[in-house]
Amino acid sequence: MRDAIRSYSEEQTRALGERIGRKLAGGDILALRGDLGAGKTCLVKGIARGLGIPEEEVVSPTYTLIHEILGSLRLFHIDLYRIEGLDDLENIGFYEAFEKDAVTVIEWPDRFLEWLPEPYLMVELERFSEGGREFKFRFRGKRFQGLIEALRKEVSDGA
């Protein structure tokens, strides 16, 4: 089994996100780690598509910090890039985003990992070329082990 999944275009990144989104359930938390331009928001657009939400509803939450999108499951898209401390987390309603009828996707989680409830799925995105991205998956808690194994099989089978 490969350690990483690669994408060679924005559409492939969105398609990977869509595959992930179709496997998610209410209460799931994803943390996206990667540099500026790594494709985090593009991946979230695909996740939204997999949840039955039009990808046009997804915008980078850099200035709104938390963007709630309604679909078959609600999607909370959170950006912690500008958050400086724990007081800021409380002020933006961070803890209210972890609801059973919602999927929560967090960009820039690095400084607050110890405050994320488990289980969660960490997706590490890295650019290896202009359009190429590599995705590595790590998880805390058992919920996501089967999801990642199924995702890797789907991708390797070309499903």
Image (tube, grey):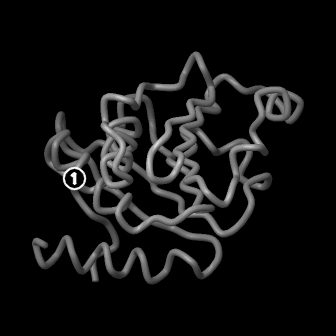
Question: Disc 1 marks which residue?
Answer: 15
Residue 27, x across and y down, in percent: 62, 61
Q: Residue at x 35, y 63 (%)?
A: 22
Q: Label 1 amino acid?
A: Ala
Q: Residue 7, position in %: x, y? A: 20, 52
Q: Is residue 32 left or right of residue 66?
A: left
- Give SS at disc 1: helix
Residue at point 38%, 45% (across, down): 48
Q: Is residue 111 left or right of residue 128?
A: right
Residue 87, given in percent of the width and then of the height, sits at 89, 30
Q: Is residue 46 above or below residue 153?
A: above
**In-image side of 127 versus 89 (left or right):** left
Q: Quadrant of the C terminus?
A: bottom left
Q: Is residue 95 left or right of residue 6?
A: right
Q: Residue furthest left?
A: 158
Of all residues, the one furthest to the top in this rendering is 63
Residue nearest the observer in this picture, 46 or 74:
74
Where in the figure is residue 80, as x and y percent of width and height? 64, 32
CA neighbours of label 1 inside 10 A, class few (<14), some (14 to 19), many (20+): many
Query: Which quadrant does the N terminus fall into?
Result: bottom left
Relative to 6, say whether 23 is above or below. below
In which quarter of the view is residue 94 placed? top right
- At 72% from the left and 27% from the top, the residue drawn is 83
